[in-house]
Image (cartoon, rainbow, N blue to C red):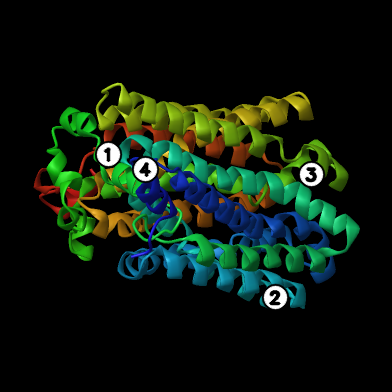
Amino acid sequence: MVEHVTERAAGRTGRAPRRTNVRWLIAGLLGTGLIIAFVDRANLSVAMPTISEEFGISPAMQGVVLGAWTWTYAAFQLPAGWLTDKLGPRVVYASAVVWWSLCTAAVALARGTVSLFGLRLLLGIGEAPVMPSSAKVVSEWFPRKERALASGLYGAGSEAGAAIAVPLASLLLVAFNWHGVFLATGALGLLWAGVWLWIYQTPRKQRWTSSAEADYIAEDDDSADRADGVDGADRAGEPAERDTSIPWLRLFRYRTLWGLFSGYVCRNFLNYFFITWYPTYLVQSQGFSAMDLAKYGAIPGVVAIFGNFAGGWFSDFLVRRGVSMNLARKIPIVVGTLGSGTVAFAVFAPNAAVALTLLSVSFASSSFASAAIFSLPIDVAPGGGNVSSIFAIQNTGSQIGGLLSPVVIGFLVTLTGSFVAPLLAMGVLCLIGAAVYGLVIKVRPLDADDRPSTPADAVS
């Protein structure tokens, strides 16, 4: 085991080692990784008008290409979650980032629709371990009372990535060409992977982490356990208990996991609008130029970052005040998901400023729910051995919504010639998602009482 610097200092002074805060550095590193992931997902949406003109891609086919990475991302979620639980996030996450960064840079070599489509499929495979690995890291590095805020911190990387991608890719497009967009953004991921391998270890092995911080991380929030009717010893008392797991296939027998899956299908239909069709909507429906995108396109993403932090802080605040984990997670999720339905009112916006304001409120509301949603797989897992797998099941639903979103929106835009129908559809799906999170999911460790008696009960 690595000897900690603070322990050596404590030995010389006779004082107890101080508690370091390396866990927040780890959360920040996760957030940076997610920023890069979202930049690499969204960069094509900015370059698409130029690429589509060069390659002669129709609007309907643009939607297929924009969403292509979600197909493989969704298909590889379950294997990625299983692999992360088996091998750990250090190696899995670094390998994934190297893979997708090379695929991003290779888009600069694309010579037509087929090669562009193929590279985006490969991008999705590389990005599949991002969220399961992040959840695993949070479960290892944070006590329950800090997990929503930690999840909000790294989760804000999605909004920050979406916000940064539009102006960054637009500026690169103006300064160079669309090839330069992908070469530059691909290089960012390779740099991050090196930093990750240099810094990341589990708390007991990380060289900058004091034993006081490692002990603090290992402590369970007994008040939260008592509020949920769970014995704290069953959650984190002994290392063996923390490794408790349910056989992988048996996870699909739980009603709560079907709720995590289906709720995210509805919710992410909206989120993927912001990383696929959002720039095109601003150009075609609101008359934005490329420079307008660079100036104002990031506004919803920037506002959403604060929504993410607020939702995570609020959920953990409720936990610290003794509110049951079930309510502490559900309140920000339901409120945020309902609020994200304001996207539908953009249909009636009289000008671009009002439309951008409504989209900002919608994205920020969705983000307000994100931190608590990211915490759910950790909260419902019976032990550390299932965290990544459960998150992967949840994120598979997320990516099915993400897969459908660009294709359905592209079809509706082609059919109707406007974004009215897609905006209304997103609003309705947000309402359905709020109902699923509020009524189907039970936020407590999976046990026999939560297991449906028949397969039909799983989706009831």
Cα–Cα gap, marks 3 and 4: 37 Å
Name the amino acid type tagged 1. Answer: Ile
Of circles 1 and 4, the one toward us is 4
Q: Position of residue 202 (x, y in %)?
A: 37, 59
Report the residue at 43% width, 48% height from top: 265
Residue under label 4: 375
Residue 22: percent from the left, percent from the top? 46, 48
Q: Label 1 vs label 3: CA separation? A: 39 Å
In three-dimensional space, the C-alpha distance between marks 2 and 3, rounded to whole angstroms, equals 29 Å
Residue 242 in view of the camera: yes
SS label for mark 2: helix
Q: Distance between the residues labelled 2 and 4?
A: 34 Å
Instruction: Kindly report which numbered mark, 2 or 3, lies closer to the viewer in this rendering.
Output: 2
Determine if residue 334 is in view: no
Measure how far apart labels 1 and 4 are at the Cα level.
13 Å
Q: List the residue tagged with mark 3.
A: 284
Quadrant of residue 322 in the image? Answer: top left
Q: How crowded is mark 1: few (under 14 residues within 10 Å), some or many (20 or more)?
A: many
- For the residue pair 118 and 413, the one nearer the viewer reads as 118
Lower position in the chain sequence, tag 1 or tag 3: 3
* Element type where label 3 sits in the image: helix
**Counting residues from the N terminus, which is met first, the one under dot 2 or under dot 3?**
2
Q: Where 93 sits versus 231, above or below? A: below
| Residue type of the residue flagged with mark 4 | Ser
Tell me the tag on residue 311: none
The amino acid type of the residue labelled 2 equals: Ala
| Image quarter (top left, top right, bottom left or bottom right) of the N terminus | bottom left
Q: Nearer the viewer, residue 230 or 401?
A: 230
Q: Residue at x 42, y 46 (%)?
A: 264
Could you classify mark 2 by the number of other residues whose Cα lies within 10 Å: few (under 14), some (14-19), or many (20 or more)? Answer: some
What label does residue 441 carry, if any?
1
Amino acid type shown at disc 3: Gln
